[in-house]
Image: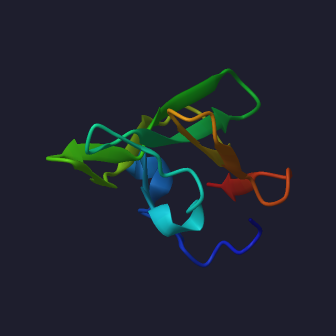
Amino acid sequence: MGDDSMVRIEPPPSIRAAKVLSIDYALERLPNCRAWYRGFAAWEILAYVRFDGGPVQSTVTTRQIGQQRLAAPANFDIPDGAHSAEVWFYASDIGGCTQWDSNYGQNYHLRF
C-alpha cells in the first residue's frame, strides 16, 4: 500500500529526544490475512524497522484480547546517534496468507 495517511508515528517533533520510535499501526491497512482457528484470530501483523541502514528489527503490532486481535503500539529503541529509520509492515495468518505494506516496495522513510 502506498497511502501513508493511516500510519501514525509518535512523537514526530522530538523523536530523537524520546529515544523510542512508537508506531500506532492502523490494522485495516492490511485487511486480507485474517484467518480464524477454533474461534480465535490466527493472524498477526509485524512492524519492521531499520535504523541508518543497520540490522532489521521487528515486533508485533497487535495483542490478543479474548478471541480477537487488537492494535497495540510497536515500540523500538532508537540507537544513539541514529538519524533515520526505514519502516514496513507484514501480515500473515495460519492459512499461509501474506500481505505487505511497504509503500510499494520502497518502505517508509523517517528522518530525525
At a point 49% along the width and 49% down the height, the residue shown is 16
Relative vertical location of residue 2 with respect to residue 65 in this rendering, above or below: below
Q: Specify whether 92 is left or right of 101.
A: left
Q: Where residue 28 sits: x, y (%)?
A: 50, 68
At a point 45% along the width and 41% down the height, the residue shown is 44
At a point 46% along the width and 46% down the height, the residue shown is 35
Total of numbered circles in the picture? Answer: 0
Q: Where residue 101 sits: x, y (%)?
A: 69, 55
Q: Specify whether 19 is left or right of 80.
A: left
Q: Where, quadrant-wise, is the C terminus in this rendering? A: bottom right
Q: Where, quadrant-wise, is the N terminus in this rendering? A: bottom right
Q: Specify whether 100 is left or right of 31.
A: right
Relative vertical location of residue 94 with respect to residue 13 in this rendering, above or below: above
Colour pattern of the rendering? rainbow
At a point 60% along the width and 58% down the height, the residue shown is 32
Q: Which of 67 and 99 is in front in this view?
A: 67
Q: Where residue 58 sits: x, y (%)?
A: 53, 30
Relative vertical location of residue 14 with respect to residue 55 in this rendering, above or below: below
Q: Where residue 31 sits: x, y (%)?
A: 55, 63
Can residue 19 be seen from the camera position used here?
A: no
Relative vertical location of residue 93 with respect to residue 8 in this rendering, above or below: above
Can residue 74 be seen from the camera position used here?
A: yes
As drawn, the residue found furthest toward the left would be 66
As drawn, the residue found furthest toward the front would be 38
As drawn, the residue found furthest toward the bottom would be 5
